[in-house]
Image (cartoon, coloured by chain):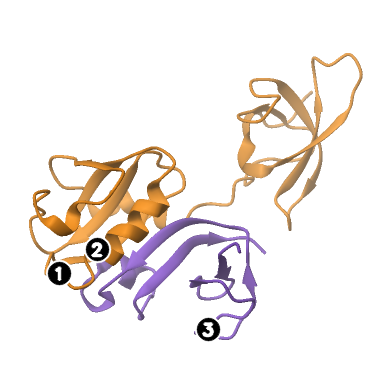
Chain colours: A orange, B purple
Amino acid sequence: MFYAMRVLIGQEKNVAALLAQSIKHEDTGISAILAPESMQGYIFVESDKMLDMRHPALRVPNLRSLVEGDVEFDELKSFLNPEPAMVNIIKGSIVELTSGPFKGEKAKVVRIDEAKEDVVLELIEAAVPIPVTVKGDQIRLIQKEAE
Amino acid sequence: MAERACQRCKYISYDKKCPICDSETSSDWSGLIVVTDPDNSKLAEELNITMPGRYALKVNK
């Protein structure tokens, strides 16, 4: 069975590693711990037993609580093979920046470096068109190709 | 020192060569799965993981 656990945001990987250490010599039934990059504040645990948060091995710093109910395996499948960030983005696409100093700005794609997953953008609303290079996962597609 | 993930088997280590399959490792990786019991894990089976340890979900070259 799969369970979701709430953890402190930003500490997902640390908690997963600490939890793995902590359950090493305990019989908790846990066989795998998953900390997907796209899921902030949660980790997933695979166990063949019911998890009891009162178990001393589950007392790990920054681990907040167990989410009630179990998670279906199909729901976790999408986290296992994360799609490349830039599948639909082509030269000339209009995108929105989702993080960094230009968060929320719209920009046009000038060049794509698929090997590095980098995208060179030109901000639409800027007075002077300056090329900005960002990672492919920092943008969201708005319009596939500008007319 | 930053942790690195193998580009082939995604095993996480500190080495430039993977201790399991001897392939190149990369410092640009994301997502984490810790497998403690690969024989009883559906997640490990889906990802073809046969050895316990820490693995990345995505490794960029």
Do tag 1 and tag 2 residues touch (Cβ < 8 Å)? Answer: yes
Mark 2 falls within which chain? A
Tell me the residue that label 3 is attached to: B19
**Residue A82 falls left or right of residue A146:** left
Amino acid type for the residue under numbered disc 1? Glu
Q: Chain of mark 1?
A: A
- Left or right of residue A10: residue A74: left
If the image is split into quadrants, where does the N terminus of chain B sit? bottom right
**Quadrant into which the C terminus of chain B falls:** bottom right
Neighbor class of circle 2 (other Cα within 10 Å; few <14, some 14-19, many 20+) is some
Image-based side of A76 in relation to B7, left or right = left
The residue under the point 41% across, 68% down is B54
Q: Give percent across and percent down for residue A36.
A: 41, 50
Q: Is residue A62 left or right of residue A47?
A: right
In front: A28, or A124? A28
- Judge if badges 1 and 2 mark residues of a common chain: yes
Q: Which residue is mark 2?
A: A22
In the image, residue A58 lies at what x, y percent?
Answer: 18, 54
Residue A100 lies in quadrant: top right
Looking at the rendered structure, the secondary structure element under dot 1 is loop
Provide the residue designation for mark 1.
A26
Rendered position, A127 above or below A54 = above
* Pointer 3 local density, CA inside 10 Å: few below 14, some 14–19, many at least 20: some
Q: Relative to A134, does residue A21 appear above or below in the rendering?
A: below
Callout 2 amino acid = Ser
Q: Secondary structure at mark 3?
A: loop
